[in-house]
Structures are given as structure tokens and as C-alpha cells.
Image (spheres, grey):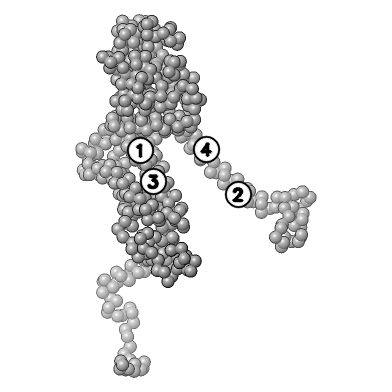
Amino acid sequence: MPRFTPPVPKALREEPPAPTEDPRTQTPTAKAAEAGITVVDWLDERTSLSGVGRWVLFRKVPKGTNWAYTLGSATLFAFLSQAVTGVILAMYYRPEANGGAYESVRHITNEVFWGQLVQGMHLWGASVMIVLVFLHMGRTFLFGAYKYPRELTWVVGVVLLILTMVMALTGYLLPFDQRAYWATVVATNITGTGPFLGPYLADFLRGGPEFTTTTLSRFYAIHMLVVPGLMIALIGVHLYLVTKLGTTAPPWRRPKEATLPEAVKAEV
Amino acid sequence: MAPNGNNRYRSKYTLDREMPGAFPGETITRRRFMTATAHTAGAIAAASFTIPALGFALAPVFERVPHHWSIAGPTDMFVDNNYIPVTITTNPGLGEVGKQLVYVRKHNPQLDTDPYDRNRPFIAISNRCAHAGCPVRWVEAAERFICPCHGGVYDILGRRVGGPPPRPLDRFYTRVRNGLVEIGPRYSVNSELRPFSPRGPGEPLDGIGQYLYPAQFDERK
């Protein structure tokens, strides 16, 4: 049994120093920490973001969660990498069909400091992102994570897959070399083979019946402005749903029998 | 029916609801009117930038593209049993992208027996494959146009003899001015070489094809 020592009566206790005079609060580190807390408190009082942060970060994760569950985050990271390198490339790129586009990409690759690295990251990162998207999708499918109540997460994910494909298609034209040009000619012609609406869609993509400088500007605008905005919004929805609904346990993990209702137990 | 609207069913008539200034047959309350006004104002504001933006993006689908005639070469440069490749500029100011290769041949009464080519002095065949738009090459020894992408093969008249193309190679209108052969706008043909307005690659023109892939607004009929 622990020995009980009665507390010292209040009147006999030594008066503690006021917080403003406490030498422990006067050190530079303590002052800096206090300033940080003040700033965070000021923001939190006005936005209540700390609750959101706790809601997003301190979630319950089912047992059996493994490395396959990181594929979504990996895809998100690939997207962020594409966004950052894309913005830097846009600072040097010129969407001119009359040789300007090719020349600007050549300038980025050969002359700009670290240009080859950034251009290479964007080029290969695109393939990495496509691969990761499909692995993430395969994980979701094989683990049955698309089932109730996560159908909407799957649908949003499929739209994101299509938008990733649109990014890959429109980005392919931008270097404007022979491969880019002919790939886009073939791609727009394939669009045109859809009955009734196809030819009009192809004309819309090309900005006319033939491949012109408008086509390059169009693809550039779609690649830089239209689709990234849509993707950021939909990634937000996707992440909200993931946070709200939580993740699933791997299919090989069975729930404990004791926790199941009788009706379900009979079926398992 | 409760006159004050406490009942689940509320009459749509202002008179039934004992509103001040109500008259028989009136259904629009002040609240409904304000709501509709706010929605209309919002719709007008949104349309005022959406419609111009859409029109701006969709205009090329409807805009008629002007065509011009470019000179291919003197009439004696061409023969009637073989094709001479000529590079013409279809879109000026675009550099290499605006150029296209055209295979030109003099009219040959033995070959061009179809009713549509009897009066054309020169035959000009586009090098864009009718399958996916890749550039075809005239192989003289085989007397065939061959596409490198997916193996489309065409005979000397540009009619498909093998591979995936759904129709013959496109052609160009030709004329002779001051002893020079000039190449004009492009047109598409079906398997009987009947001319149609220009279509994109991969669009068939035989049977139901000409209805599934109608003529475009931005091309001359």
C-alpha cells in the first residue's frame, strides 16, 4: 500500500512566482513557444481549424492496414510533383506552333539551370502518376473498398482517372516535336470517329477542321487551367469522403464473431 | 383548410392565406417574387460570362474556313502513270505544321474511268491516311499507297485494298492557270470515288456512314 502523505496546508506553502516573473518563462525559447501558441490560438479562435485537423489526422484505422494503403497518398504526391514542376515549366514554355514551342522546350532542356531535371521530372512523373493511379484503383477493386458506403469515392476516383488521362493526352502535344504532333493528329482523329457528335468534338479540340496554332493553345489551356482546377476540386472531394467514411480492413480479415449480430453470424 | 396555413396543406392562393392586399387568383407571394427575382438576377449574371466563354470556345466548330489555291508546278512536270509528290501550304503562317504532301498525276483515260473524274485534268491525292491521319507513302514498284502506322494499303486510285481505312484517300480539287497546275480545297470520296465534302480520317462514307458522319459546319459543302 502506498504511504499517504498529507499535503502541506495552503498557508504554509511558498508562493509561486507570477507567470510573468517566473524565470522559466523568460528564456528566449519559452518566449518563442509562447508567441507561436498565441498565433495558433488567434487563428484557431477565428477558424476552428484545429478541430478539422484532429478530424483529418486522428482517425481510427482498421487492423491489417498495410503498405498497399499508401498508394492513394503516393498518387496525391505524384500529382503535387506534377503541379509544382508544371508551374516552373510554364515560366519558360511558349505555346507557339510556328517553332516557338519546340524551341522553348529545347531551351528548357539544354540551357536553363536544372531545366533538364525539372522537364524530366514532369515527363516521367506523368507516367509514374498513371501507374500509381492504376495500382491505387486495383487495390481498391481487389480489396472491395468501393462497396457501400464508399461508391461515391469510387465514382469521383474514376472521374479523376479520366482527367489524369486528359492531362496525359494534352501534355503530350506540348513539346511539339514530330511524335507529339502525330500523336495528337491521331488522337483528335480518333475523337472524330464517334458517330454524329465525334466530328464536332474533334473540331472543338482542334479549334477548326485542321490542326492549327489554335490547337496548341487549346491543349495548353486545357492542360494548364481547365483540368488542374477540376482535379484539385475533385481531389478535395475524394479526400473528404475518405476522411468521413474511413478506410476498409483488408478482405482476409474477418470481424470477431462476438461482435456480429445473430442474423449476420448465421451467414458468415 | 386552416386559413393561417398551420395545416400541412397551404393554399397557393394569397387570398386563402389572408395576405394583405391579396386579390382573387393571385398566387405570387412577396417572398416567392423576391426569391424568383434573386434567382433570375443570379442566372443573368452567370450567363453573362458563361455564354461568351462558351461561344468563344465553340466558334471554330461553326466558322467556315477560307481555302486558297496553291501552285503545284508546270503542267509538263506531271505524268499520267505515276505520282509526283508536291508540298503545298494548307495553313499559311504555321511553319512545317501548315504544310501537306499531295501526290499529283495527270488524268489517265485508262485509269480514271469513274464518272466523277472524267473531266478532271489532274488527280491530286492527299497523303493523310483515311484511317487515323498518318502520312501515307506512294510506293512506285508496288503501285500502292502504304501507311506506316497501321498498315493501310491503297491502289493507284487511292481506293483501299488492305488494312483498316474505312474509305479511299482524300483528294484535292485541281485546275490549270497560265500553264501551272493549282491545288485547291480537299474533298473526300466514297469507295465509288463519288465526291463528298471533306471528312476527318476514320469516318466511313459508304452506306450509313455518310449519315453517321455528317458534313461539318466549318467546311464548304
Circle 3: element type: helix
Question: Same chain for the residues at labels 2 and 3, yes or no?
Answer: no
Mark 2 surroundings within 10 Å by alpha-carbon count, few (fewer than 14), some (14 through 19), many (20 or more) = few
Q: Which part of the image, by quadrant, shows the N terminus of chain B?
A: bottom right
Q: Position of residue A137 (x, y in %)?
A: 37, 50
Q: Which residue is mark 4?
A: B51
Q: Position of residue B155 (x, y in %)?
A: 34, 16
Amino acid on which the number 2 mark rests in the picture: Ala
Amino acid on which the number 3 mark rests in the picture: Leu
In the picture, residue B139 is in which quadrant? top left
Q: Which residue is mark 3?
A: A161
Q: Which residue is mark 2?
A: B38
Chain hosting mark 2: B
Question: Same chain for the residues at labels 4 and 2, yes or no?
Answer: yes
Chain hosting mark 1: A
Chain hosting mark 4: B
Q: Which mark is residue A169?
A: 1
Amino acid on which the number 4 mark rests in the picture: Ile
Name the one closer to the observer, B20 or A114. Answer: A114
